[in-house]
Amino acid sequence: MFLLQGAIFMVLAGMVYQDFKYRGIYWWMFPVLFVLMATATVQVLGFTGTIAQAGKSGLFLALQFAVLTGYISIKQKKLTNLFDGFFGLGDLLFLLVLCFGFSFLNYVLFYLLSLMLIILFTAILGYQSTAHGKKIPLAGYQALLFMILMVLSRFTPAINLLADDHLINLLGYGN
């Protein structure tokens, strides 16, 4: 399991580097990361548990994209493709792969908090990049945050990215 997590960490580090430097990630990194993360999750949750968790997270993501498409289409007064300047395909692929790295509540929490942190970070520092326009390396930032979470979960037993029990207890809904 340690070697598998190390391989995941290395692929994520490559994605961070590429997205920050080139605003793009090699396409083959997504299936590699998917296989590594799905394998690691299947070892912990089993096949059906992995599919159930990833399915719920994928439905959440689909709902988010449907709402975002509706909002932007209304704002633009025409049906708008999100991938025409609003969102990168690599960002979507990364979010889909992340469905296999988190339990459902952890995925939703990571998704929302990472977007808020990235917005805050870019607002405070101001994103100046003439070479790549005003593109924000969303997948790169999220990969970096996921790497930090991987390290924290390794050394903090209370952080379990594949179980919602601790979050439910924190919210006061546990038994």
Image (cartoon, grey):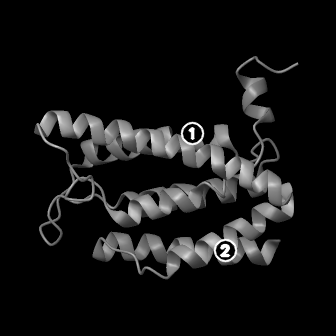
Residue at image coords 49%, 82%: 28
- Percent x, y for residue 140? 42, 64
User: Which of the 4 quarters of the picture holds residue 73?
Assistant: top left
Q: Nearer the viewer, residue 99 or 67?
A: 67
Place of residue 153 in the rendered image (x, y in percent of width and height, measured from the top left) = 73, 52
Q: What is the CA distance from the residue labelled 1 to the residue labelled 2?
A: 21 Å
Instruction: Reply above or below: 50 against 59.
Output: below
Dot 1 falls on a residue whose secondary structure is helix
The kind of residue tagged 1 is Val
Frontmost residue, 29 versus 23: 29
Residue 35 disc label: 2
Relative to 169, residue 51 above or below:
below
Residue 6 vertical position relative to residue 46 in the rendered view, above or below: below
Is residue 152 rendered to the left or right of residue 59? Answer: right
Locate residue 20, reporting x and y percent: 34, 69
| Location of residue 105 by image quarter | top right
Residue name at image x 27 percent, y 52 percent: 82
Q: How many marks?
A: 2
Identify the residue position indicated by label 1 in the image: 108
Screen quadrant of the N terminus: bottom right
